[in-house]
Image (cartoon, rainbow, N blue to C red):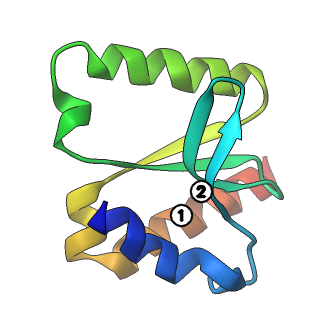
Amino acid sequence: SLPEGLLWQALRAHRLEGLHFRRQHPVGHYVLDFYCDAVHLAVEVDGAMHFQEGRPERDAARDAWLLQRGIRTLRLPARLVLKDMDGALQTILREVGARRRG
């Protein structure tokens, strides 16, 4: 999707404070939009389909499954990525900082 492509341009090649993110990273039977192994963080870009009936519950079950394996999920609305990339990147950095402290 466009928001994922734009976010990838900001994350790839260690562009965000030297952090290494992988795109479309498989974990179990899931594929994560972005994954940073150094802090065990999945970043998911949620478009409108994530708010359709049944999807929030499936996302919550997926996030819980990942958390059981030590991977925290940060969900960013696609509209945030499109309208405020700096805000999206700052949100990721705050979560990375919390993971490093925690």
Q: Could one spot residue 17 in this view of the protein?
A: no
Give how far across and how far down residue 34 sits, in percent. Answer: 58, 55
Where on the picture, by quarter, is residue 14?
A: bottom right
* Residue drawn at 83 percent across, 58 percent down: 38
Give how far across and how far down residue 89 sits, in percent. Answer: 47, 73
Task: Indicate left or right for 29 with 68 as reference.
Answer: left
Give how far across and how far down residue 85 sits, in percent. Answer: 34, 78
Task: Indicate left or right for 27 with 31 as reference.
Answer: right
In space, the residues marked 2 and 1 are separated at their CA atoms by 5 Å
Which amino acid, by three-letter code, is at mark 2?
Glu
Q: Which residue appears farthest toward the right when viewing the image? A: 38
Where 32 sits versus 22, above or below? above
Secondary structure of residue under mark 2: helix
* Label annotation for residue 70: none
**Pointer 2 local density, CA inside 10 Å: few below 14, some 14–19, many at least 20:** some
Q: Which residue is mark 1?
A: 92
Task: Indicate left or right for 3 with 44 as reference.
Answer: left
Q: Nearer the viewer, residue 88 or 13?
A: 13
Q: Nearer the viewer, residue 4 or 72?
A: 4
Where 2 sits versus 49, above or below? below
* Label annotation for residue 95: 2
* Residue drawn at 59 percent across, 19 percent down: 64
* Residue drawn at 16 percent across, 16 percent down: 53
Q: Nearer the viewer, residue 99 or 25?
A: 25
Which amino acid, by three-letter code, is at mark 1?
Ile
Marks 2 and 1 close (CB-CB < 8 Å): yes
Q: Could one spot residue 50 in this view of the protein?
A: yes
Give how far across and how far down residue 2 sits, in percent. Answer: 28, 67
